[in-house]
Image (cartoon, rainbow, N blue to C red):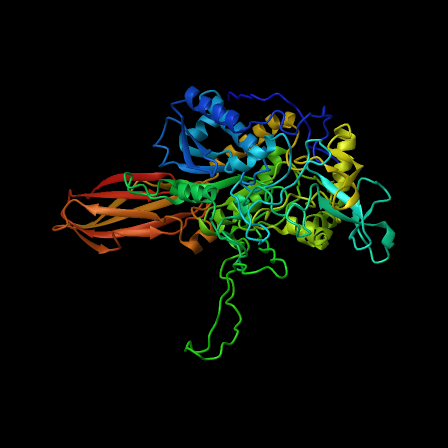
């Protein structure tokens, strides 16, 4: 078998505590080697121009800033048309600061297009499958990665009132020390929640009950309190984290203006792409999507298996805030005017929050394959909230997987106890007990929602900052952390400014992108090849008497996946397998036993299903049989002669 390897950068993923063991020459900017919007657009257009027979590039929507959300369709020339083949949807960079997701998605597209006709595996898969690749779902937010002043923010650039003061984007950060980075400020304060670590003065630790008051600090994001509300940078430029904006598990107790599921253009564009009805085709063409592969801060490939939803939260408005819009359900006794209101317990959330047990083996088998193909054996991840991952599985009804690509990797020899402790959600770390300014920034669900793996806001409240520092000291020449340095602040007095370089813990150095892309391309090919394959045996006809015939048809699923997940059957969003027959002459031919149309909701991998019909008919008449399996190979037909 011929193989092709377009990427030659070698690196090892075997590491004791952290991610990759290569020695890296520090980049002047974290964005060096990454594609900004213009470069990404050019790269995608070039792929479409170079491979017109197997690709189609289209914009599935535009952002608030007018940028196109690109989708590259890739499908081989053999077999049926791309919309009839089973498809894998690949999505990257839904969080604005997780730019590595778009780079790996682009790398997968390059691997597939260059390998078609050259690599046997790529060719075979593309001739039977379609790939829909949306490399950058949040192009507006991603552009902040390439700005002259760097600040981490997962949101898009849709202005909103984050602090409930009826003003928009009025309190953003300032680069006080002029280093082009928005980091943190620490200031001594006896009411603070943090102290300087004795082991490493770069680290801030959550205070203990016996921590001396003169050692305590408060921590703020770098900048001024521009609106005088004693909060810092709580309402800067930017909007909603797209990977927190999907309908499933969004939460019900909304807070703030324009805070609701699918409020953002980017979210609407992807949902519309997946579900839109095409009047010309007279169908929903993307119902051929059989699985979703997401690259985001969430991980259910190396960090665990299946999907367990997190708890959606919304920050409360400041005390005294006037006329804050909020969603509230009021229950009345009897409903008559003037009758006394009585509170009732709100109804139980009807949305499922964890993987159906019957789907557990599917998720585990895919996770095992991911670890073997990529070499990424473990990762850290919070639980998803309002994410594409949840929407794709719990509502669209297909298996959905996410890899975060770059996070702390644990030493497997330390055992499961350390792993279990390390993967607790961020809300369980000390970061949840920050002073109000830091808490507001972390809990801004309309913006963050899916925090980075490890502690957010660049503080170390019981998180993994010590491990990140150990990694950068050993493998990155110590670069990636701004040493604390004094600064005279016009509002806080004497402070120190320092902390991790923005994006350092979210996006790896660019020289790791080629290998990550190749290994994840191999995984994407493996994932697409697992989809259900529904086949129909040649119909068998038995003559029982001069005008009575028996027809037997057996269906098989030769794929690795079931035709529909247990969740897909529960939601009924998966088009059933349809077996249908039509007679040459309905007047002279009658069905004596069975139904002309049979809808089958599922067929397990390796399973078969036999159907029998009794038909009263003159000899020599024909019966047309049609098998339609939208997520299992498309349409198959057969003609039967009764004799």
Query: Which residue is located at x 50 percent, y 58 percent?
Result: 351
Q: Is residue 135 visible?
A: yes
Vertically, is 566 above or below 479? below
Q: Would you identify the image quadrant in which residue 626 lies? A: top left
Rendered location of residue 380, percent (x, y):
66, 44
Q: Would you identify the image quadrant in which residue 271 lies? A: top left
Seen from this angle, which residue lies furthest bottom?
A: 339
Vertically, is 536 above or below 373? below
Rendered location of residue 530, percent (x, y):
48, 39
Rendered location of residue 100, percent (x, y):
59, 33
216 sits to left or right of 632:
right
Q: Is residue 424 visible?
A: no
Vertically, is 23 above or below 85? above
Quick one: 482 or 534, which is closer to the camera? 482
Quick one: 408 or 153, which is closer to the camera? 153
540 sits to left or right of 287:
left
């Amino acid at each position: 078998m011929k193989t092709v390897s377009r990427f030659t950068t070698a690196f090892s993923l075997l590491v004791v505590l952290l991610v990759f063991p290569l020695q890296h020459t520090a980049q002047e900017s974290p964005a060096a080697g990454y594609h900004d919007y213009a470069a990404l657009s050019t790269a995608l257009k070039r792929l479409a121009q170079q491979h017109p027979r197997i690709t189609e590039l289209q914009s599935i929507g535009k952002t608030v800033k007018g940028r196109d959300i690109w989708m590259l369709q890739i499908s081989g020339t053999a077999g049926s048309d791309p919309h009839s083949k089973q498809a894998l949807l690949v999505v990257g960079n839904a969080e604005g600061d997780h730019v590595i997701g778009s780079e790996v998605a682009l790398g997968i597209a390059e691997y597939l297009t260059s390998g078609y006709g050259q690599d046997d595996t790529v060719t075979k898969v593309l001739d039977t499958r379609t790939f829909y690749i949306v490399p950058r779902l949040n192009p507006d937010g991603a552009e902040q990665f390439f700005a002259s002043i760097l600040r981490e923010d997962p949101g898009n650039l849709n202005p909103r009132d984050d602090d409930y003061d009826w003003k928009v984007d009025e309190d953003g950060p300032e680069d006080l020390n002029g280093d082009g980075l928005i980091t943190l400020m620490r200031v001594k304060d006896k009411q603070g929640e943090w102290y300087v670590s004795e082991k490493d003065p770069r680290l801030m630790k959550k205070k203990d009950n016996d921590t001396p008051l003169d050692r305590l600090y408060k921590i703020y994001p770098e900048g001024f309190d521009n609106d005088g509300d004693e909060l810092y940078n709580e309402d800067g430029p930017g909007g909603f984290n797209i990977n927190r904006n999907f309908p499933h598990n969004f939460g019900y107790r909304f807070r703030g203006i324009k805070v609701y599921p699918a409020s953002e253009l980017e979210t609407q564009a992807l949902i519309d792409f997946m579900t839109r009805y095409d009047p010309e085709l007279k169908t929903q063409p993307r119902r051929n999507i059989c699985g979703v592969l997401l690259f985001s801060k969430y991980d259910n490939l190396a960090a665990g298996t299946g999907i367990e939803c997190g708890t959606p939260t919304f920050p409360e408005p400041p005390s005294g805030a006037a006329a804050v819009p909020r969603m509230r359900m009021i229950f009345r006794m009897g409903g008559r005017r003037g009758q006394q209101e009585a509170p009732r317990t709100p109804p139980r959330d009807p949305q499922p929050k964890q993987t159906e047990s019957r789907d557990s083996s599917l998720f585990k088998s895919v996770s095992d394959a991911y670890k073997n193909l990529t070499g990424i054996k473990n990762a850290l991840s919070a639980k998803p909230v309002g994410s594409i991952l949840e929407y794709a599985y719990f509502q669209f009804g297909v298996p959905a997987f996410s890899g975060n690509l770059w996070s702390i990797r644990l030493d497997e020899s330390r055992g499961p106890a350390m792993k279990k402790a390390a993967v607790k959600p961020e809300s369980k770390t000390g970061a949840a007990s920050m002073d109000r300014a830091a808490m507001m920034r972390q809990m801004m669900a309309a913006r963050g929602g899916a925090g980075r793996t490890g502690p957010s806001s660049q503080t170390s409240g019981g998180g993994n900052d010590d491990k990140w520092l150990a990694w950068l000291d050993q493998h990155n020449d110590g670069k990636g952390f701004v040493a604390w340095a004094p600064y005279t602040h016009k509002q806080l007095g004497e402070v120190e400014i320092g902390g991790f370089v923005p994006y350092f813990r979210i996006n790896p150095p660019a020289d790791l992108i080629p290998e990550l892309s190749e290994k994840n391309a191999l995984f994407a090919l493996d994932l697409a090849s697992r989809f259900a394959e529904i086949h129909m045996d040649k119909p068998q006809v038995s003559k029982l008497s001069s005008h009575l015939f028996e027809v037997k048809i057996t269906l098989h699923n030769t794929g690795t996946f079931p035709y529909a997940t247990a969740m897909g059957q529960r939601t009924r969003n998966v088009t059933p397998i349809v077996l249908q027959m039509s007679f040459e002459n309905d007047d002279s031919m009658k069905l004596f036993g069975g139904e002309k149309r049979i809808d089958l909701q599922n067929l397990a991998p390796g399973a078969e299903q036999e159907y029998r019909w009794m038909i009263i008919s003159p000899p020599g008449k024909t019966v047309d049989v049609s098998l339609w399996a939208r997520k299992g190979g498309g349409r198959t037909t057969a003609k039967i002669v009764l004799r």
